[in-house]
Amino acid sequence: MESGRATLLKEQQLKDQFDNLEKHTQSGIEFVERYSKFVKERSDIEISYAKQIRNLSKKYQPKKNSREEEENKYTSCRAFLSTLNELNDYAGQHEVIAENLTSQIITELSRYLTELKAERKSHFHDGRKAQQQIESLWKQLESSKRRFERDCKEADRAQQYFERMDADINVTKADVEKARQQAQMRHQIAADSKTEYSNYLTKFNQEQNEHYYTLIPNIFQKLQEMEERRIERVGVSMKTYAEVDREVLPIVGKCLDGMTKAAESIEPKTDSKQVVESYKSGFEPPGDVEFEDYGPGQTMKRTVSETSLSNSRGEAKERPGGGKSKGKLWPFIKNKNKSPKQNKEPLSNRFNEFMASKPKMTCLRSLRRGLSLKLITFNSHVRNLIEGSGPEDFSHLPPEQRRKKLQAKIDDINKDIQKEMDQKDALTKMKGVYEKNPQMGDPASVDPRLVEMAMNIEKLQSEVQKFEGWLAEVEGRLPSRSDPPRRQSGLYESQNSTMVDNNCAQDRESSPDGSYTEDQSSETQVKVAIANTPEFDDEFDDGDEETLPTIGTCKAVYSFEGHNEGTISVTEGELLFVIEQDKGDGWTRVRRNEEEEGYVPTSYVEVFLETNTKGAMTYI
């Protein structure tokens, strides 16, 4: 009995140890999963950081055809561009960190966790199976033991019954024989039960010995080895985690060295020299002013400034209000290299032509409409003048700037000539191959292209000769430092021939794509010119104009951005009120609300006039 209780106690303790091991190994697996999650979040942070760094570098990259791209000729701007490129490479190293963390740690740990869970499950399954087997043998042993005990008790009772029957004289001999046989049978059954119990006991002892000294120790050893491998794998992953960062440190150091080198390459004197080289005009300094003696009956002549916008040498004209009109300053007016083919005129004369192009309107409203439309058209002309629509020989530029533009133009044309010649050589070789191998192609099919290229080359060469002639003219007229200074003076017509060229004489129409924009400076100058005219002051002093009635509605067919004075911006599909229909000049006056009104191109809106309006109709 004591032996049986000890066996049960050991079984219970063994079961408890399996439960403890199961909990410990499960917590180990959870630790690996938690560490894998930590590395994954670190990888996500690296990817996000690299993306933000790349976006930052891209954001500050110079835009194509922008002022920032032109400024890259300065060492400070080039250093900043190099810093942005190095920063982009720096972001790439963080992407490498994220990639290595994913491939070397996260992926490997995920695969290892799958194998670890399967191995753990197998070991605990073997342990439970061994435990169930020993428990089954124990139950069989207990069953045979109870049966042996029962049979022994039955045999004792049968023997006692036989002895009572044999001692009783009243019992027949047959009953005594029957009792004796029954006792012998019971003793035989007890002997068989004893043998069976002995066999089960021997088997159980053998299985129990193997269970506690072989099976269970082996399972525990495997679990211990599994746990040690898990801990070792975590250590290797932590080491790899550090090595991943260490591997990119040399490249990160090179990126930082590149930034330092870029910063050290900045040369302030070189940048300042480039600024001087870019903006020097090549004009001669003015000479001394000659002394003019005063005599009886003589008047002193007023010397006109080189930068004056006045068109005469006389005194300033008096305005009706008693004030004097102020001349606008305009740098680099005088053009010594004026092209003989260009017929230029003062900007003020051109403005007067615009103002006098139509008969003067009588009513205040019509006059304001006419002036607004003239202002829109005139601003378009001024914008084309200022924004680079100059003459082909760049005569509107100062001498030094003109020389640079001509040289750049010659270089571009020479590149085009070289490109055409290379293509011509390639076609010539192709034609030779066709002549040697007619099956590859017809040689005559290349001739039209060769003729076209020859014409293009001849045309480009003539262009080069033309620009080289202008360049020789400029280089011949550029003053040397040894030349004595001369006083530059003259009338307005000769002074401003640089800024106003034959482009003003060309008829320009508003673009149908809605590009009604002009330079702010030119618009301001025109406004000043209008404000300085007596007619403007006389007829526009009264600001109390009655609100125009609505004569219909309109719907914007296209979007229009009204940057000019007197226009209004509209978006496609917008509904507006019509307060003045087209007078034949291509503009319709509309109103959005009580405070916003202006002109829009008639072709940009679909107008619906009211039926009670005189001459009402619907048009697009």
Image: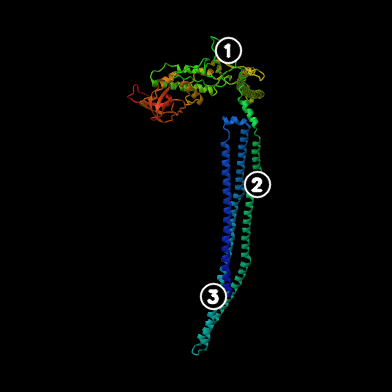
Q: Residue 138: x percent and y percent?
A: 57, 70
Q: Earlier in the sequence, mark 3 or mark 1?
A: 3
Q: Residues within 10 Å of mark 3 (few under 14, many from 20)?
A: some
Q: Which corner quadrant holds the N terminus? A: bottom right
Name the residue that disc number 1 marks. 293
Instruction: Label 3, secondary structure: give it.
Output: helix
User: What's under tag 3, amino acid-wise?
Assistant: Arg
Q: Residue 258: x percent and y percent?
A: 65, 38
Name the residue that disc number 2 marks. 246
3 and 2 marks in contact (CB < 8 Å) = no
Between the C-alphas of marks 3 and 1, the distance is 157 Å
User: What's under tag 1, amino acid-wise?
Assistant: Asp
1 and 2 marks in contact (CB < 8 Å) = no
Rendering quarter of residue 438: top right
**Which mark is on residue 147?**
3
Number of marks present in the image shown: 3
